[in-house]
Image (spheres, grey):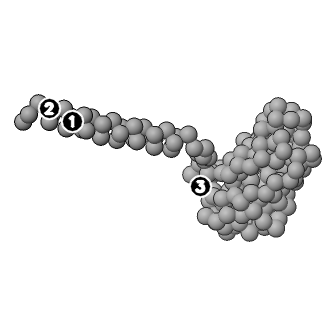
C-alpha cells in the first residue's frame, strides 16, 4: 500500500475509536449522577422536615402494621402529631415524636413505634400514608407494604420490656 493512503485510514480509525470512547464515558457519567432512593421506602419534603425511607410492614392478614420512617429537620423544632395509613389513624407510642431543630428522629421497632390496627394493608401493595406535623405542612406518600419477614421480621413485635427489680 502507498504511504500516502495509510495515513488517512489510520486517522479515520483513531477518530472512530476516540468517538466511541467519549460516547461511553458520557453515558456512564449521566447514569451515576441521577438521584435515586437505594431503599424500599419513599421520600418526601414537608417544609423544613425531610421525610425519608417511609414504608409499612404488615402481617400477612393485613390487620396489624407498623410504619417505619426517618425525619431530618432543617428548621426549628417540630413534632409528628399523627399518621394516617389508608383509612386508619395512629399516633406515635408515648405521644408526639419530637424532631429537634437541625436534628433527626425515627419511627421503628428500635425506637418510637407507630403501630396501626385495622389499616387493611396487604404486603406487596402500596398504601397512602399521611404525616401530620405540629408546624410543617402535612405530607402524603404512597408507601410500599412489606411483609414482616427477612429484615422486617421483628418490626411488628413490640420491644421486650426490661424486668423491674
Q: Position of residue 73 (x, y in %)?
A: 81, 37
Locate the C terminus and report the quarter of the image it occupies: top right
Residue 149 is marked as: 3
Q: CA distance from mark 1 to mark 3?
A: 65 Å
Q: How many marks do you count on the picture?
A: 3
Q: Give the structural element (helix, strand or loop) at label 2.
A: helix
Q: Quadrant of residue 127?
A: bottom right
The structure residue drawn at horizontal position 88% and vertical position 50%, both measured from the top left corner, is 137
Q: Position of residue 93 (x, y in %)?
A: 85, 48
Residue 4 is left or right of residue 105, and the answer is: left
Residue 41 is left or right of residue 10, and the answer is: right
Residue that label 1 marks: 8
Locate the N terminus and report the quarter of the image it occupies: top left
The structure residue drawn at horizontal position 74% and vertical position 69%, both measured from the top left corner, is 120
Q: Nearer the viewer, mark 3 or mark 2?
A: 2
Residue that label 2 marks: 4
Amino acid at each position: 500500500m502507498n504511504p500516502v493512503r495509510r495515513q488517512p485510514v489510520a486517522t479515520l480509525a483513531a477518530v472512530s475509536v476516540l468517538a466511541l470512547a467519549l460516547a461511553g464515558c458520557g453515558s456512564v457519567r449521566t447514569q451515576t449522577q441521577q438521584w435515586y432512593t437505594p431503599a424500599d421506602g419513599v421520600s418526601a419534603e414537608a417544609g423544613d422536615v425531610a421525610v425519608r425511607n417511609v414504608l409499612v410492614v404488615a402481617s400477612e392478614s393485613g390487620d396489624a402494621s407498623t410504619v417505619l420512617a426517618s425525619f431530618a429537620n432543617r428548621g426549628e423544632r417540630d413534632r409528628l402529631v399523627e399518621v394516617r395509613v389508608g383509612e386508619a389513624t395512629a399516633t406515635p407510642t408515648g405521644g408526639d415524636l419530637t424532631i429537634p431543630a437541625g436534628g433527626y428522629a425515627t419511627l421503628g421497632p428500635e425506637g418510637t413505634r407507630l403501630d396501626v390496627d385495622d389499616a387493611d394493608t396487604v404486603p406487596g401493595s402500596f398504601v397512602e400514608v399521611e404525616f401530620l406535623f405540629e408546624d410543617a405542612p402535612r405530607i402524603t406518600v404512597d408507601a410500599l407494604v412489606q411483609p414482616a419477614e427477612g429484615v422486617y421480621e421483628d418490626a411488628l413485635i413490640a420491644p421486650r420490656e426490661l424486668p423491674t427489680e
